[in-house]
Image (cartoon, helix red, strand yellow):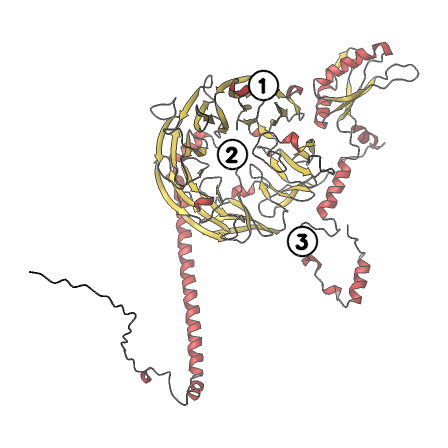
Amino acid sequence: MTEVLPMAEIESLASRLGVDFSQVDLDSIRLPPGDDFGIPSDDEEAIRQEDALEYESGFGNIIVVDNLPVVPPEKFEKLEGVVRKIYSQIGVIKEDGLWMPVNSETQKTLGYCFIEYNTPQEAELAKERTNGYKLDKAHIFVVNLFDDFDRFMKVPDEWAPPEIKPYTPGENLQQWLTDEKARDQFVIRAGSETEVLWNDARQLKPELVYRRNFWTESFVQWSPLGTYLATVHRQGAAVWGGSAAFNRLMRYAHPQVKLIDFSPGEKYLVTYSSHEPSNPRDTHRVVLNIFDVRTGKVMRDFKGSADEFATGGTGGVSGVSWPVFRWGGGKDDKYFARIGKNVISVYETESFSLIDKKSLKVENVIDFSWSPTDPIIALFVPELGGGNQPARVSLVQIPGKEELRQKNLFSVSDCKMYWQSNGDYLAVKVDRYTKTKKSTYTGFELFRIKERDIPIEVLELENKNDKIIAFAWEPKGHRFAVIHGDLPRPDVSFYSMRTAHNTGRVSKLATLKGKQANALYWSPAGRFIIIAGLKTLNGQLEFYNVDELETMATGEHFMATDIEWDPTGRYVATSVTSVHEMENGFNIWSFNGKLLYRIPRDHFYQFLWRPRPPSFLSAEKEEEIAKNLKKYSKKYEAEDQDVSMLLSEQDREKRKMLQEEWDGWNKKWKQMHEEEKVDRQMLRDGEASDEEEEYEAKEVEVEEILDVTEEIVPYEFDQD
């Protein structure tokens, strides 16, 4: 680390070099990102101080159980077995984690013991559940956390009334939702700058909320409900919030953090890092921490080799699938799970320990996913024994781990699972081998989760040999879309799980032939979908109304890499990120395909809409509003008219200003031309060549031979 000079030496050195140190603006100096030149940042110093406080004792997972029976050596084993049985029901006791001190003189126990759990949460739960536990009439347990003894020792001898601090209300982290114009926010990263902006579609431009240079060292991420904005740094992660200032709310110390993931209800933050081994033959070491978002406390950590975290998923870094932990049980963040070799480990967040203290054993399981709303896991097991044991998809209820439904699948080459956002349906895309094993074809197994006995339908395309390019459920709806066929012009088909004439069977609504498309983006409100051709298809966009089965508009955002709907389904952002060197920036469109404005930005990295929490309105209330929309819309139509008039006035003012600039420029050069007239005449020997009557216009025709070709044409005589 570079040596840091004292201020006195710096001033002395500046004096010798002739530098007026008082004229140097120290606040304007910016160090390059990723280099601290031996000077710890404020964040680093604060994190070190917080670590010293948090890990001062380091015994948060140990409890002290007092008022146990005092027994001789021959009864010691029996008492230990009773205590272990009581406390192992609450959490996992570490190996050699139960210790009963013995009186060295009498060889009897001292009436208390120490129990060490895997996690502090298990220890706290054990204290809560067993403090006051009645073993018998004479022995009622008194349980404390070991760390509490430090606090007890610091209690002063004389009581003093607590200091009453004045109430200072915290910042309203949801204030952005009360915007009078009902606008949405988004965050962008371009170059070294990160900006939060309002999407002011009426004014046809964004409005800056907050800008910061070097705010993050890799990426930013909104929390699922939009409360926090997370940034990533060498020392760890941080979350920020507010309506305009974006103050830092909490830091999470995790050196070299590479990835982060919020739980659906924003209660917890998972951070991940991998570390190169000192021995090249060893594997990467992985560290995962689960933090309480509000307190910054580590609730549970996981450490191991990269191989232990590489099973399943879609790939992360260093061979580790991401996210390692997948959250289930809806928005209450009650469960999380990870896949391992022949097991799925499901944890509950009350104690952050395994449910029933053991993993769910599933031989050869390779993938799983949670229902978005219910504690149900869908898991996939491929064929075993060369096809003697078929592949299967199973639905398992948590926490009971009972199997709700199972479907055996034969000749399977691949399988993908897609949940509908309400958890009403599960689509399983199954690629099967033909009888010759030389090719595959695709079909869908459609589970109706909320219906009795979970019925399953099989859907095959009209041409079952069509390749499936994309699949997407309509959010909160009963329809889904499929892109199938061969690029560059596959077909797009729409299906419904429920139609007016047939509520119990899937039916096709329409097929659009020969579309330049490879991606599907449903509006969050359903009904509308963007059929997009990204990457090699150069950003082709088709805005489609599925209710009416008609195209509303087509467009193009050349080289577009990303598409994202705003959380209300009113606007769409298309962007070109820095994977391309040219055309970087983003466009904002209306839901029906009208281009509202373009923002070019060099070195453009990220565009993310700020998520909104679920509406508090009931389905009945939303339906009532939809029926009376004209009554509510009058106010906004008047506002739109005012904005339209304002934009027209601004446009007129702009044109008037440009005209005045042109007239002024023209007048200036005419005046200069007139002033230089005498000089020009002198240079031309007194000739007034500026006068038009001095010239005579003549038209001259010039003929030019371009090419000459000589050709002999045979002549035939008429013999008659």
Q: Is residue 382 above or below residue 201?
A: above
Label 2 belongs to which residue? 614
Q: Position of residue 86 (x, y in %)?
A: 73, 15
Q: Which quadrant is home to the C terminus?
A: bottom left
Q: For marks 2 and 3, give the CA distance.
A: 41 Å
- Residue 293 can be seen, yes or no: no
Residue 10, horizontal then vertical, whole percent: 79, 60
Q: For marks 3 and 1, give the CA distance.
A: 52 Å
Viewer-side label of 2, 1: 1
> Which comes before the other along the chain, label 2 or label 3?
3
Foreground of the two, 204 or 599: 599
Determine which of the numbered discs, if any, sits on residue 139 in the image: none
Q: Earlier in the sequence, mark 3 or mark 1?
A: 3
Amino acid type of the residue that numbered disc 1 sits on in the rendered structure: Lys
Which residue is tagged 1?
Answer: 401
Q: Amino acid at mark 3?
A: Pro
Disc 2 vs disc 3: Cβ atoms closer than 8 Å? no
At a point 81% along the width and 12% down the height, the residue shown is 77
- The kind of residue on which mark 2 rests is Pro
Q: Is residue 542 at all visible to an observer of this figure?
A: yes
The x, y position of residue 674, in whole percent, is: 42, 82
Q: Which residue is mark 3?
A: 32
